Amino acid sequence: MKQSEYIQSFLKGDWKSGIAVFLVALPLCLGIALASGAPLLAGLVAGIIGGIVVSLLSGSELSVSGPAAGLTIIVANAITDLGSFPGFLVAVILAGGIQLILGLLKLGKIGGFFPSSVIRGMLVAIGIVIILKQIPHAIGDDLDFIGEFEFDQKDGENTFSEILKSLADIKIGALLISLIGLVILFSWTKLGETIKWMNALPASLFVVVAGVAMNESFPFWASDWFLGNSKDHMVNLPIFASSSEIWSGLVSPDWTFFSNPKVYSIAFTLAIVATLESLLSLEASDSLDPLKRISSPDRELLAQGTGNIVSGLLGGLPITSVIVRSSTNIYAGGKTRMSGFFHGILLLVAVLLLPLYLNKIPLACLASILLYTGYKLAHPKEFKKVIAEGWKQWVPFLVTVAVVVGVDLLWGIFIGTLVGLVFVVITNFSSVFSVFKNGNEVLIKFQKDVTFLHKMSLKETLRKIPEGSEVFIDISKVHFMDHDIKLIIDEFIATASERGIEADLKMKKI
């Protein structure tokens, strides 16, 4: 896209989705830093770099990056093993370098080897986890950080026992704030049809304004409901006296740790886990993209690697593309990378200028924004859609959902993918397609059977077709076509005209 198109998209609506992502990212950055045993500023630095640097370099228009909850255990253990956060920063920088190498070697395509049933299961599962984890925050139980997504918690509780425990001590103020927030979010679009000016403003901003106003009014008519007398229930940004104090608060890497062999094993672990999470988030973001754009995974790895190097140098946590932020961006109406970039700018402004004001935001109203995002991800229609596609789709889908909810994200992806691979092997394994070009005419001819293992090569082929081409896709020889391939072809044909491409599909004659 041209610079003028980005500016136009930003003015048209990306600024609104940027605010929504910022409001979700702010407590996540702080909570993840706290859970990792790192300085709070380290989480904010990672969020700022993920927004400002990675968004501009990313292979995706909608993916949003920052510190990830999935890395908290790895980060916490690494800091403990090294006995030094400055030493850990060296590992973050090395991990970024490894990601750059992976990107230059064009190994980002491994993300295409995950079946769509697993990706869709991951999205639904994350939606369910968000809902389950935010219920305690919505009713005032804020002892665990707002970005925690693992089933087993550090305090000995698990996802379900924490909900039961929180029900025993409901904070009425938090409950009212979160309920009003949900009413605003679910009714905003409908009200916008009659009250036109509402479409010009982000619903998430009104949720926060309403939450702050309610909490500030409680002392005058229901003092027991007031949440502001405890930092546990509020956004808790660190307050600095001046910008120079912020700069002096940044931690520099301790380069003497280059001689410590533990740094290299930690860097490799960070690079692999962060890479897998980023590529999976990229695939998930593409599946949610209303325009069905195909992102470049190799460019995404280069962006993630650059982001981690910069974050490590400035004292920040490791960065990945994060589906919670990305899905919030998409459901808030984001269209280009400008929304992710703007959320990074807002995080920077928050640290420099607005900590006193932002610390008046109750976590309950931010929980309502996350609950809304979780509902969108785990909408019942997603279950109906997958089940209607047959057991070969819904079995790996449900396995992925169950393991992500009951264990964690990475285990869910691993086991779901294994189950998906078993079904592919049972069905068929080999397939090929050929590309023939004659001027502006392009023929994509499929031979025999097609599996999801060829998903990435097909996506790359379709992505590189230039504007003005006439594309003919011949599947007349195909006996079996994997569901992933069919989805890609259908989406390409449906959106080809938007790219100035004429596309035609040749099927079997009956």
Image: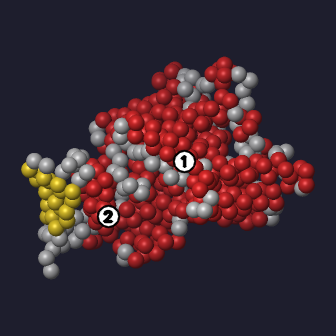
Residue in view at x 22 percent, y 71 percent: 480
Residue 17's disc is: 1
Residue 376, image quadrant? bottom right
Q: How is the image coloured?
A: secondary structure
Closer to the camera in the image, 210 or 165: 210
Q: Which of the image's four quarters has the C terminus?
A: bottom left
Q: Is residue 88 above or below residue 22?
A: above
Of residues 348 and 304, which is closer to you in this image?
348
List x then y, in percent, for residue 487: 32, 64
**What's under tag 1, amino acid-wise?**
Ser
Instruction: Decide if residue 346 is in sight here.
Output: yes
The reply to whether residue 339 is visible in this rendering is no
Which residue is denoted by mark 2 in the rendering? 487
Question: Which sits earlier in the primary sequence, circle 2 or circle 1?
Answer: 1
Image point 22% across, 46% down: which residue? 466
Q: Secondary structure at mark 2?
A: helix
Q: Quadrant of the N terminus?
A: top left
Q: Nearer the viewer, residue 170 or 435?
A: 435
Q: Residues within 10 Å of mark 2 (few under 14, many from 20)?
A: few
Q: Secondary structure at mark 1?
A: helix
498 lies left or right of 41: left
Residue sitting at 53 percent across and 38 percent down?
A: 342
Q: CA distance from mark 2 to mark 1?
A: 27 Å
Q: Residue furthest left?
A: 438
| In the image: residue 433, left or right of residue 81 | left
